[in-house]
C-alpha cells in the first residue's frame, strides 16, 4: 500500500465513531430449546472505543447480512462497477444435514475468519447500517446470560454431587401443580408431593429427587419450603422458559405432557414447528394438532393462521388460578390423523365441520 493511501485510511479510521465494531470473535455456541431446537453463536465484539460486549446470532442472520451486503456492494453482473463496490469475503455455505451441534462447532473458525475479513473492509463500509446493526448489542442480547464462553475462559471444575442427603434438613419444595415431563431428564410431579432439591439448574429450573427418581423440573410448579444454599445456586442465571400443556387423545387412552421451551408467553410459533415438536414428544408421525374453542369443541389446526386464531381465542378465556405463571394460555390436543371420532357430532347426528379449510 502506498504511503498516501495508508495515511488516508488511518485518518478515516480516526474519524469513525467509537461505537463502530472493529473486531469480533466467537466465544462459544449455545443451544436454544424453542419449539424447534437450534444453536446460536455467542460473539464477543470490540468497538473502536475499546468496549467489549456479547451478541447472540444464528447462522441465518449471518446469511441475511451477507445477502444484504452483496446486493449493495458486490457489483457482480455489472460491466462497470461503481465507486461503492467492493469484493466481499466468502460466507461458509449452509449445511442441511447432520448433527446440529457438530455443524455449529465446525462453523466457529470459518465464521470467526469471515467476521475478521468483514471488519477489515474499508472504513466507509464499516459505517453501513446493516453491518452495524448486526454487531449492535440489542436489549435481548444484553439480557442473555452466557453459559461457558469456552474460547474466552478456562473450563470450570465440575462440582461433585452429594452422595447422601439428610432428609430432615435438606432443601425441599412442595409441588403446586402436576407436571408431566417431556424427556427422560425431567421429573414427573404430582400436586402435593414433596421434592428434595439438589441444585438450581438455571433461573427457571431445579434438579431434585422424588421417590428415588432424580431429574429436573420448572421452579414455577413448586413452592419452596427450604431453599438451596447459595453454593448450589451458582448457575441460577439463565434462559427463561415457558411451559405448554399438551394432550395425546386416543380412542382408548390419553397422555398428558408439559413441554417447556425457551420462548416468552407471547410467542406465536409456526404450525410446522409445533407439528415437529409434538411428533418428537409423543413419538408418533401420523398425528394432527387440535385445540378447544370457547365452546369446548375440538378444532383441527392446518396452518399458521389456525395457530394465530387458537392463540387469540385463548386470550379471551378467563384465567384460572390453577396454573403456573409461565404456562401458555393455549393448549394442544394431539390426535391421530385418521381418527375423526374425536370431533363432536351435532344433535341431528351429522358431524360438525371443525377442520378449517
Image (spheres, rainbow, N blue to C red):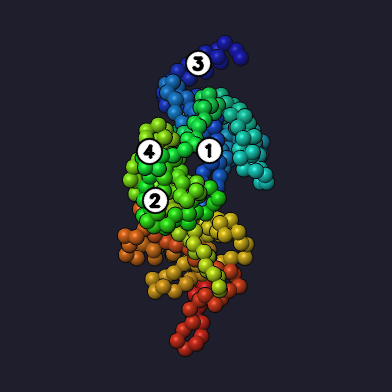
Relative to 302, residue 97 above or below = above
Residue 216: give its label. Answer: none
- Gap in Å between the C-alphas at discs 2 and 3? 67 Å
- Gap in Å between the C-alphas at discs 2 and 1? 33 Å
Which of marks 1 and 4 precedes in the sequence? Answer: 1
SS type, badge 1: strand
- Gap in Å between the C-alphas at discs 4 and 3? 56 Å
**Nearer the camera: disc 4 or disc 2:** 2
Q: Position of residue 73 (x, y in %)?
A: 57, 34
Q: Dot 1, how many residues are within 10 Å of its Cα: few (below 14), some (14-19), or many (20+)?
A: some
Compared across the picture, whether 314 is left or right of 274 comes to left
SS type, badge 3: helix
Q: Residue at x 41, y 35 (%)?
A: 232
Which of marks 3 and 2 precedes in the sequence? Answer: 3
- Gap in Å between the C-alphas at discs 4 and 2? 15 Å
Pointer 4 residue: 228
Pointer 2 residue: 194
SS type, badge 4: loop
Q: Are marks 4 and 2 in contact (CB under 8 Å)?
A: no
Q: Dot 3, how many residues are within 10 Å of its Cα: few (below 14), some (14-19), or many (20+)?
A: few
Which of marks 2 and 4 precedes in the sequence? Answer: 2
Q: Dot 2, how many residues are within 10 Å of its Cα: few (below 14), some (14-19), or many (20+)?
A: many
- Gap in Å between the C-alphas at discs 3 and 1? 37 Å
Residue furthest bottom as drawn: 348
Q: Position of residue 138 (x, y in %)?
A: 42, 37
Residue 30: give its label. Answer: 1
Foreground: 298 or 234? 234
Foreground: 222 or 138? 222
Pointer 3 residue: 10
Q: Position of residue 168 (x, y in %)?
A: 37, 42
Amino acid at each position: 500500500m502506498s504511503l498516501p493511501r495508508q495515511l488516508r485510511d488511518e485518518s478515516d479510521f480516526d474519524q469513525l465513531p467509537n461505537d463502530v465494531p472493529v473486531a469480533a470473535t466467537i466465544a462459544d455456541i449455545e443451544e436454544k430449546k424453542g419449539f424447534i431446537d437450534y444453536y446460536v453463536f455467542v460473539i464477543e465484539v470490540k468497538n473502536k472505543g475499546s468496549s467489549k460486549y456479547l451478541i447472540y446470532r444464528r447462522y441465518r442472520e449471518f446469511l441475511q447480512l451477507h445477502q444484504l451486503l452483496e446486493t449493495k456492494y458486490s457489483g457482480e453482473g455489472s460491466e462497470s462497477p461503481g465507486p461503492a463496490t467492493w469484493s466481499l469475503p466468502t460466507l461458509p455455505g449452509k449445511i442441511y444435514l447432520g448433527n446440529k451441534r457438530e455443524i455449529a462447532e465446525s462453523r466457529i473458525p470459518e465464521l470467526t475468519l469471515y467476521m475478521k475479513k468483514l471488519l477489515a473492509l474499508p472504513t466507509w463500509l464499516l459505517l453501513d447500517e446493516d453491518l452495524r446493526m448486526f454487531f449492535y448489542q440489542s436489549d435481548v442480547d444484553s439480557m442473555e446470560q452466557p453459559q461457558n464462553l469456552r474460547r474466552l475462559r478456562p473450563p470450570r471444575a465440575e462440582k461433585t454431587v452429594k452422595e447422601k442427603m439428610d432428609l430432615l434438613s435438606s432443601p425441599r419444595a412442595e409441588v403446586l401443580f402436576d407436571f408431566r415431563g417431556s424427556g427422560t431428564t425431567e421429573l414427573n410431579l404430582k400436586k402435593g408431593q414433596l421434592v428434595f432439591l439438589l441444585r438450581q439448574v438455571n433461573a427457571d429450573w431445579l434438579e431434585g429427587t422424588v421417590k428415588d427418581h432424580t431429574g429436573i423440573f420448572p421452579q414455577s410448579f413448586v413452592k419452596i419450603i427450604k431453599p438451596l444454599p447459595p453454593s448450589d445456586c451458582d448457575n441460577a442465571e439463565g434462559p427463561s422458559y415457558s411451559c405448554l400443556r399438551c394432550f395425546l387423545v386416543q380412542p382408548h387412552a390419553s397422555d398428558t405432557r408439559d413441554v417447556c421451551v425457551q420462548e416468552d408467553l407471547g410467542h406465536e410459533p409456526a404450525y410446522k414447528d409445533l407439528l415437529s415438536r409434538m411428533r418428537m414428544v409423543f413419538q408418533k408421525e401420523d398425528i394432527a394438532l387440535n385445540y378447544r374453542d370457547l365452546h369446548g369443541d375440538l378444532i383441527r389446526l392446518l396452518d399458521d393462521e389456525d395457530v394465530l386464531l387458537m392463540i387469540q381465542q385463548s386470550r379471551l378465556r378467563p384465567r384460572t388460578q390453577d396454573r403456573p405463571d409461565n404456562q401458555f394460555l393455549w393448549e394442544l390436543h394431539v390426535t391421530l390423523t385418521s381418527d375423526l371420532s374425536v370431533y363432536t357430532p351435532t344433535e341431528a347426528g351429522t358431524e360438525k365441520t371443525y377442520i378449517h379449510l
